[in-house]
Image (cartoon, helix red, strand yellow):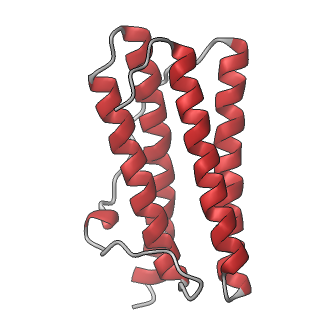
Amino acid sequence: MNEFKSIDDILDFAINSEQEAIDFYTKLATVAKTDAIKEVFTDFAGEEAGHKAKLIEIKKNGSFGVITEKISDLKIADYVVNNQPSPEMTYQDALILAMHKEKAAFKLYSALADRAPNADIRNLFLMLAQEESKHKLRFELEYDEYVLREN
């Protein structure tokens, strides 16, 4: 894992991670075979762009108040097989991919919080983990609504 020496190091890492997610979803949108899947990936990229903007604003203003809230976990990502991105992905496949990606980001930030050298850095990682947890929940709710209820 990276060694972070400051809040700015963490924010730069998180901003880069969000950019990687933007690039990932944008690339998938460009190769999607259907307009529906293209729209899903474009929306995902837009959400990640919003997260990146939020992190840039935090870095610029120097404040990142942590509001602790309990985020529900439907644990759907724990029971669906992860898949690889492909142009032939279905909406279900896209949601599964997104759930797993957000779960991995949550685990990363949680692990970094556990290793943080001070309370400020720990709180920033916890805030980022909480954001990723919210993203995962959004995809799980979407999966529940459009995949599980249809079956």
Can you say whether 28 is above or below 123 in the image? below
Name the residue rendered at 66%, 56% in the picture: 23
Q: Quadrant of the C terminus?
A: bottom left
Q: How many marks?
A: 0
Give above or below for 9 relative to 139: above
Residue at horizontal 44%, vertical 57%? 101
Q: Is residue 45 above or below residue 87?
A: above
Residue 89 in sight from this viewpoint: yes
In the displayed structure, 150 sits above or below 105; it is: below
* Residue 56 placement (x, y as % from top left): 70, 28
Residue 135 in the image, given as x and y percentages of width and height: 51, 51
Q: Position of residue 24 (x, y in %)?
A: 60, 60
Asked if residue 110 lies left or right of residue 95, the reply is left
Q: Is residue 62 left or right of residue 100?
A: right
Q: Nearer the viewer, residue 104 or 72?
A: 104
What residue is at 37 percent from the left and 9 percent from the top? 119
Q: Position of residue 71 (x, y in %)?
A: 40, 43
> Which of the 4 quarters of the picture holds residue 14?
top right
